[in-house]
DNA sequence: TTCATAAAATACGTTTTCGTATTTTATTTA
DNA sequence: TAAATAAAATACGAAAACGTATTTTATGAA
């Protein structure tokens, strides 16, 4: 599946990734060893339980990163897109993936086998720190997620999810409005509810004039009101 | 509040802490700078938002580690006890506590100011790795927690909580049965529900013969059945 | 464009969870 | 030990969330 090789130094996506801070030697080393690959919509990049074999730098498209546990129902932890890194690990305690990543659009990414990436990051203090910071960010993110899951109503969680989707999918083009590559079930898996609830609440929001949408196309969001619903228990006024 | 100084090398609690793997020089350095302190039941060790000022090694007693967010309702993430470490940090991105720790019994602990601990851990690769591993463990723990909060029923979550409480509080003495230092509200904050629900479900379990308890004293647990309820959707047989 | 298929919307009865109010039981203090 | 206070148990109506069934709309293949 290898496509043409590109150079990290001139990579348009580098600026929004952890490689932004790295020196040229590190970038050269990564350029040398990385493989440019693609993944079709719906395909798995890796699955919970798989050995961590390498680092993935997402260049284009989106993936849902989800937790499965034993059950059939997934919980989507985050949406990875341009500039995000997946499959990073700090040490051998991370030998195995603890979540799965599935493409929700066609995806382009660069891949560095872990044995090589490890050597490179061991030589670059900056890169090592960036990876540790990814962990810290992930920990904070999931703490907030846990709090949301524990205490918010489904309505509040759906409002929060819509705001996340807007943030994620509206940066692609400059037009007002955006198109999500998430179905209702995906949104449900993001907030821990059912697709019927998501449908119902999205329609409620429409009736209240807070959003305008048909299925996956959103043409208007009342960001202020949605934020109030998602993040403040007692809406002032 | 400083009590008599003790030595890490002879410390009875060391074996169940991250200091178990450390060399003598590291232990000597910590012994030299640590302060032995105590904290009364109900008091805060630190609060979400406080600057991280030092590392806490719990020697005796228990604390609830909780997340608050903006709201009044806390979410208890874990119970810290003998051998656990709190307030560790990897780098300056961790300048601020992201949870609070409150004693649920009288607590004894050792304290090392962060400036000193940082110097010591920078000299000890082993200690540094142990701290990173604490992070990895914390991340895994909270991922499981998120999944639980998202998908399990209150009944399943209370069963899980009782198993956690048993594990936490029954190691103290060898007798059958155990006494929890958690009130119904604490259990509710552990699973994201209300104290009334916890009371009701605990009574249900009693009626079903799965547990025997009065308020905080548990004299019998049917571990097999509770595990089935907590961890398996479709009870086999 | 039309048909087939999948996704979304919708309605509605059932179940779960919540929250208030009250009683009972523990625990603490005088 | 008794009284005062806090915690737990209990009951129950209200609200939220779920899940099934059906209709409508969107999407993709022929």
Image (cartoon, coloured by chain):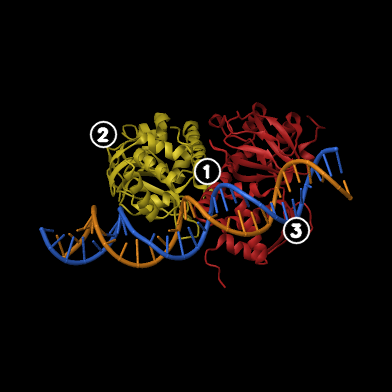
Chain colours: A red, B yellow, C orange, D blue
Q: Residue at x 52, y 43 (%)?
A: B147
Residue B174's disc is 2
Q: Secondary structure at mark 1?
A: helix
Q: Secondary structure at mark 2?
A: loop
Residue B192 seen in this snapshot = yes
Q: Residue at x 51, y 38 (%)?
A: B140
Residue A166's disc is none
Q: Secondary structure at mark 3?
A: loop
Q: Decide which of B74, A120 is in the foreground and name it.
A: B74
B86 left or right of B60? right
Q: Position of residue A77 (x, y in %)?
A: 59, 45
Q: Position of residue A186 (x, y in %)?
A: 64, 46
Residue A82 seen in this snapshot = no
Local crowd size for mark 2, using a 10 Å CA cut-off: few (<14), some (14–19), many (≥20): few
- Label 2: chain letter: B
Q: CA distance from mark 2 to mark 3?
A: 63 Å
Which residue matches tag 1? Answer: B147
Q: Position of residue A156 (x, y in %)?
A: 57, 58
């Amino acid at each position: 599946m290898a496509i043409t090789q590109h150079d990290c130094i001139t990579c348009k996506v580098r600026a929004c990734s952890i490689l932004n801070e790295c020196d040229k030697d590190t970038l050269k080393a990564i350029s040398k060893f990385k493989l440019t690959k693609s993944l079709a919509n719906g395909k798995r990049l890796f699955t919970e339980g798989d050995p961590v074999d390498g680092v993935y730098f997402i260049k284009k498209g989106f993936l849902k990163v989800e937790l499965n546990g034993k059950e059939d129902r997934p919980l989507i932890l985050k949406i990875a897109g341009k500039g995000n890194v997946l499959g990073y690990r700090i040490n051998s305690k991370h030998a195995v993936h603890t979540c799965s990543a599935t493409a929700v659009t066609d995806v382009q990414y660069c891949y560095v086998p872990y044995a090589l990436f490890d050597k490179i990051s061991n030589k670059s203090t900056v890169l090592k720190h960036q990876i540790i910071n990814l962990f810290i960010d992930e920990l904070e993110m999931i703490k907030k997620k846990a709090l949301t899951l524990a205490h918010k109503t489904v309505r509040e969680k759906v409002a929060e999810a819509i705001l996340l989707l807007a943030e994620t999918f509206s940066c692609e083009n400059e037009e007002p409005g955006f198109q999500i590559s998430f179905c209702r079930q995906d949104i449900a898996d993001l907030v821990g509810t059912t697709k019927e609830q998501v449908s119902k609440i999205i329609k409620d929001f429409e009736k209240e004039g807070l959003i305008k949408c048909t299925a996956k196309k959103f043409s208007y969001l009342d960001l202020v009101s949605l934020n109030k619903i998602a993040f403040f228990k007692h809406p002032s006024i």
